[in-house]
Image (cartoon, grey):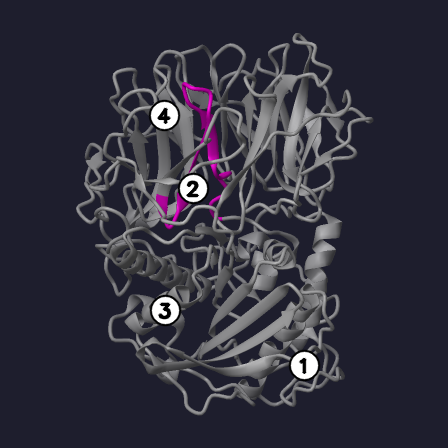
Amino acid sequence: MNSRWTSRGARTTRRQTLAALAVLTAGGAAGIAGVTAIAGCGAGHSRGAEAGPARASAPGAAEPFTSTVGDKRALLLQIMAHPDDDLYFMNPDAEHVLRSGVPVVSVYVTAGEALGINHQAGTPVPRADKAAYSASRHQGLRQAYARMMGLNQFAPWQRSVLRLPGGITAETNTLVGGARSARLIFLNIAMLSDGGVRIPALWSTPGTVMRTLLAAGSPLAHPSSYGHQTLVDVLAGIMERYRPTLIHTLDPDPDFQVHDVLHPKDNDQPGCSDHRDHTPVALFTWKAIARWVAASTRRDKHAPRFTTTAFRGYYNQRWPHNLPPAVLAQKARAIRSYGGAPDWDCGNAAGCGDYSQGGVRPLRNRKGWIRSTHYRYPSPLPAPTTDTQGRLVAYGVLGTQAVRWRETEPGSGRFGAPRGLGGGPLAPALAAVRDSAGRQVLFALRFAALAGQGAGDLREIVALEQRRPDGPFRAWTGLGTPESDPEQGRRVGCPAAVATPDGRVHLFVRTADKGLATRVRDANGHWGPWQRLGGAEIQDGLTALLDAEGQVRVLAPGRDTVHHWAQEWAGGPVSLRPPSGLPRPGGDPLGAAVAPDGTLTLIYRTPTATVPAVHGETSLTVPHFEGYGAIAAHTVAEPSGHREAKTLLLAGRDLGGEIQVQYGTGPEAKPLRSPGRLTPVGAPALLTDDAHQGVCVVGLSPDATPWIWRPHPTSRA
């Protein structure tokens, strides 16, 4: 693959923007106005009017974000619909965080009782017993978490009653093993409550009430009742009690999905790539996050310091698998302990796991949920750049608000306290570019309306621009989405952007139909309309950059190959190019760099591959860079110090989830391991920094603080 791709003409539609958003959240997250349509994938009934960008009321001025600097307290809070959602969709990330010594609190909203039949293949089908099946799944989770903590899977847990807002009670189980600890909280709302009511109705239908199911052997004496607001208050109360620095959620806005003979619906909700319970539980979680942030901000005068990661669910069945064998085996070990078997001596009379998930059955399941871990918002965070004084600057999302960190001194390797930039509630998806005048421009994805109970639901792309280089920011600007239907707008992807020498800024997002759309800011600061650029069946996680000739390139992983869009000349329109013919990517964002000869070099792993491949004028594999997930790439000076010699620098996660970098791609090149065993949240970012040792890697830790690593090459690659 090189920079001499041909054009195939882009498809451009009429202007499609959302209506001016009167329900935008004011200030921080202090109250999410407006509300959400439905939890599932039903089409919205309202249409957005064509309008220019709506002004958001959140200020762009920097404000103190938190009163604590250097606080290394960390806690991971996970909120799932069912027992095992964490094991299937949030691992290996959750296990890596747990093994690093960060306490984990996992909340399971439903009882997971289904039909109440705990059946192991090849044995007689038992009678239905919902209370026993729920208790057996709880026992499976205890086995899995003990295994992930490095303990005997039958280690004894402390079981007790947790009292929650509104008079709600829940069962909680705790286990401590050395520096590792886990707490499981079972809200146990019946999946099928009285009158056939399910979780989607609790989100979308006013007046809905659901009851809990008492699991067999539970220490709880009485069931509880949940209305919509009850669940929001309970989840927000759990957040306030445990003060997480990292929250794992499910996908609040899953992809639309055709269900036909080639793509059977299976367990998906109609029209979507996820279970009908996953989506409303994710929406409840994000609403509770906003409620917690609002209450904490009013009380403490600053938002709580935390970051979030949202994980896709049954989407894993629809796209290429991205976990190599070693990581898949680690994930399977925990699920094997969760599945258990009837002949295990676990000490739980109700059962020793979810027998349908025991042994090797998850690995043999044609749906392949175990074989991937996909992020709903795959943007690397924080997004690094430098200021006019040569200091490293990073932008991210904390407490659902945009923040800026700045290096204390050029080259110090230490960030100062974060400064709040507002804009929330934001998804953890942010892009940052510097325009030709030296001003920073940020883009984020905002939950513009989120409340449920039959009201409207909106997402929008928002922008924040500096008035002058290193100066104050203007107010946030709403840019809408390329979709006129709010239900379609919920499915837009993460923003990616690139600034060009002619003063333009090009913004890109994946559309609801899995193509590409753009909106361009001209040199005078005026935004043009959204335009669709064609293409289809790409995954989210766009890579946008300038090639050696100053032309915009956009790359995206697809089901079949790498998809790409480009300008034919600098300043021209970006258009879809013919198929690249490259091997199918494994589903993670692509790494790209401009080689010294001007060609575009692309690096990524094919499905289930352990080592990546580099595609440029020639293609080769990188034998020692074993790992998984997204890979960042940059062309940098040779480690030998020759100013004219350049080599490719790679950064990503190793098989254990820790950060590694490598100078060069030859057979003798070896990865450098991160100091202090850095376990990142999501993917790290890579920035060339010629003023200070050439390059730096920037990432976010589970304690919601960013780190800087300037690796020193020890030998020629």
- Sequence-wise, the earlier of marks 4 and 3 is 3
Q: Amino acid at mark 3?
A: Gly
Residue that sits furthest to the top in the current view: 644
- Sequence-wise, the earlier of marks 2 and 1 is 1
* Residue position marked by numbered label 1 in the rendering: 352
Badge 1 crowding class, 10 Å Cα cut-off, few under 14, some 14 to 19, many 20 or more, is: many
For marks 2 and 1, give the CA distance. Answer: 40 Å
- Sequence-wise, the earlier of marks 4 and 1 is 1
For marks 2 and 4, give the CA distance. Answer: 16 Å
Horizontal arrangement in the rendering, residue 165 relative to residue 412 (left or right): left
35 versus 408 height, above or below: below
Q: Amino acid at mark 4?
A: Gln
What's drawn in magenta, residue-wise? Answer: 376-401
* Residue position marked by numbered label 4 in the rendering: 440
* Residue position marked by numbered label 2 in the rendering: 429
In what element is the residue under mark 2?
strand
